[in-house]
Image: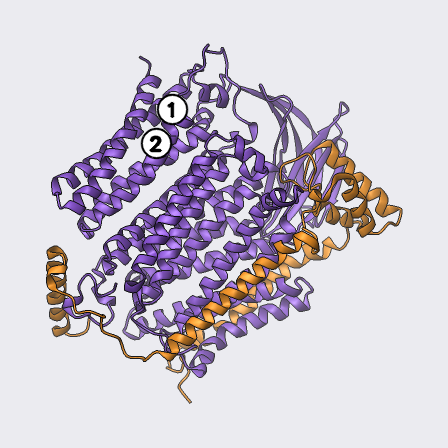
Amino acid sequence: MPPAPWSAACPLERWWHGWPVALAGWLALVALAVLPTAAWAQDSAAVQREATEIARTLKCPVCENQSVAESPSPLAREMRAYIQRRLAAGDSREAIVQDLVERYGEGILLEPPRAGFTLLVWWLPLLSLGLGAGVVALALWRWKQAPTHLVAPAEPLDEREVAPEDLARYRAWLAAELERRERGPV
Amino acid sequence: MTPADGGNIALLLAFPVTAYAAVASLLGVRRGIPALVASARNGVVVVAGLLTLAALALFHALLTHDFQLRYVFEHSSRAMPEAARLTSFWGGQQGSLLLWAWGLSLLSVALVWRESRRQPLLVPYIMAVLLGIQLFFVFILGFVSSPFERLPVAPADGRGLNPLLMDPGMRLHPPLLLTGYMSFSGPFALAIAALATGRIGREWLGAMRSWLLLAWTIQGCGLLMGAWWAYHVLGWGGYWGWDPVENVALIPWLTATALLHTILVQERRGMLKTWTMALAIATFALAIFGTFVVRSGVLTSVHSFAQSPIGPYFFGFLGVVLIGATALLLHRLPQLRAEGHVDALLSRETGFLLNNLLLVGMAAAVFWGTVFPLLSEAVRGVKVAVGPPFYQQVTGPLLVALLVLMGVGPLLAWRYTSARNLLRLLAGPLAVAAAVGIALYALDIERGLALVAAAACALVVGGVALEYYRGVRARQRAGQALLPALATLVARNRRRYGGYLVHLAMVLIAVGVLGSGHQIEQLITLGPGEAARVGPYTLVYDNLYGFRQPGLEGVLARLTLEGPAGEPLATLEPDRRVYRNWEQQPVSGIAIHTTWPWLDDVYVVLTEADTANRATFHVFINPLVVCLWAGGWLFLLGTLVAAWPEARPAAVSVRVPAPPRGVAVSEV
């Protein structure tokens, strides 16, 4: 069993031994402080919340990149009111969204439908990620197959190919490094 | 001759000078004529001088209301205060492109000056690439879309700037992003020069890292500044809307993040060379794409692309960059073979590979979502929207995976880590993560992916704390006191410990994002003297007051914010203002107060008021959003620590010394 990293004895270190516990306790305290907000969130009216949720998934037809929930435009305001009315009348989310899509077109759906042509937008990221994972796996596998010792450069290089200033700098560095090593570890 | 004429002449002159210098540097190095290279080097300075003159002339025209210039007429007005008129410089397409080109000219001077000492043999190629990019921009600015275009008659007043752009945040955010986009030219020029010469040595890696770090930091600050501006000005209670303009700025930053990490692998293990080059090229191409998207509105519709005069040129340039760079890369492929190998699956190399997979995967997903509406319109003639719900669902899991990797990766050793050793190291951070996860679950605060993300954040914090602790303890063993030990630890390994600070900054940002998921939103209408409860807080509405400033007038509502126990916390004054010439577009002044110690942002927007002074407020409670801005500062601090030049030569951290015959080319 290898020794634990904090096994050496010194009062400060023994105090440090408990750091994960201390950190966890502190984080739990912060979480407790956040709690009141989270609890209050449950209280607001359910209909309004659902209406906002629906409005967030719809693009305001007359704005650039603003959802119906965010846009200050009169049309968006009307649409929000419409959603609330329909929800209050007991209509389902799907029915409301479908009616709005029929009126304003598919372009108002901020979440592209997972069907037909727009299925592409969902599948391509997954596909490319899978492909990338395959490439990474292949690279790892091939690297693991290769011998572990360093390979020499394919062709020996002529010193003339090396820039004189590079060579001079390198030699200076080598000399300094050798001297440093002779002096022993820092 | 007015100063604007002078600026125009300087801009037009910059074109032949740039063309000459680009040709001279290439010809000089290929034919071996040092005098030509030296003259090209002077050319770089001359171009910087000319573009500085042009930029100063545009500033002068904006300050002196030279409305004869179309640009000044369209983007400023007499009513605007001076500082806002300076903002107009980057309020439109031509000015933004001029800022880009001007920045590039200054970057070129700095890069050529610095690298002349570090790697003189690469400099002619670096110059040629930078001047080639410059040539494109100077051509556009001089002959296609000039900021010095004149109107036949000088109007009495200008149209002014969109009021949303008048905020002080706007003075920093666009120039930061434009400078960020521009600075990715540096790493690109280095990559092309290395591919052209076949010299990819230690000096090159160092230069690559520092110039990339610069661009990455500027772009990162620009992104955060954009979030800050959206949060403080747009009034919808959020900071990131997955808007195409935001997305295209994020994509090169993601690929640059991946690049920063692969450089480490190349430095330590001599691997991933081709990939590093490909990332540098892709990042630059994406930066050009971003610049173009921001300044042309191409993503609103395919048709606006055809109408934009600069569109075809930009796509032509992008094509040249991609095809040329790829051809060069393929040509050099045989020399880019890896020197090292992956010895074990459980190693830091694997961690970096996964990091790249996730970052590039995320960049690809965001890119795909951003261009998909165009594709749909072109293929089917149907415009579709790809909005926040898509991006949240696609990038969410990738971000969580990145956070987990950020927690585990730094604890992995190079080459090989035993599972036992890793578990021993991970025990502490995992305990912290489990404690946080269980606490959040038990208190019913987070569920599902958000719960995993929160636990992963704790894992990263635990891991970074452990790394710092191990480093400090080793120094304490050697007899140093706590604070000096910490100081020397960071000073001796700036890159590593600075990098950890950036990781912590990312955790803070993630915490801000998680917190803002608990937003409470409420619309309240109050008469004077009435009060309403929003979440745990109470807002007491006092009354409406009118106010007037040069160029604008408005009304402000005064409210008192009270805490859960009824204690007064702050006075909030959201307002609604109308800028002259923009009467149909009133702007909200948002009041935000961060409560202590809960770190909730109480965010109040005045939406409507009637003659009886009854006012409607859109109120948001945004928990922990302040962590985003704190994370931004920590990000800046971390990159500064990591980028600060090392006092001692890098010789100390060198791996096995290479044989002398392999000086410049052995790492090829």
Residue position for label 2: B138
**Crowd around label 1: few <14 · some 14–19 · many ≥20 (10 Å):** many
The correct choice, above or below, for A127 with respect to B617 in the image is below
Q: What kind of element bears circle 1? A: helix
Residue A4 appears at what percent x and percent y?
A: 42, 83
Chain of the residue where label 1 is placed in the rendered structure: B
Res A160 label = none
- Check disc 2 and give the amino acid type: Val
Figure colour scheme: by chain
Q: What kind of element bears circle 2? A: helix
Chain B: its colour in the image is: purple
The C terminus of chain B, quarter of image = bottom left
Residue position for label 1: B59
The correct choice, above or below, for B444 with respect to B412 in the image is above
Query: CA separation, marks 2 and 1?
Result: 18 Å
Residue A53 appears at what percent x and percent y?
A: 73, 49
- Check disc 1 and give the amino acid type: Phe
Residue A35 appears at what percent x and percent y?
A: 67, 59
**Towards the viewer: B529 or B468:** B468
**Towards the viewer: B144 or A80:** B144
Chain A: its colour in the image is: orange
**Towards the viewer: A135 or B69:** A135
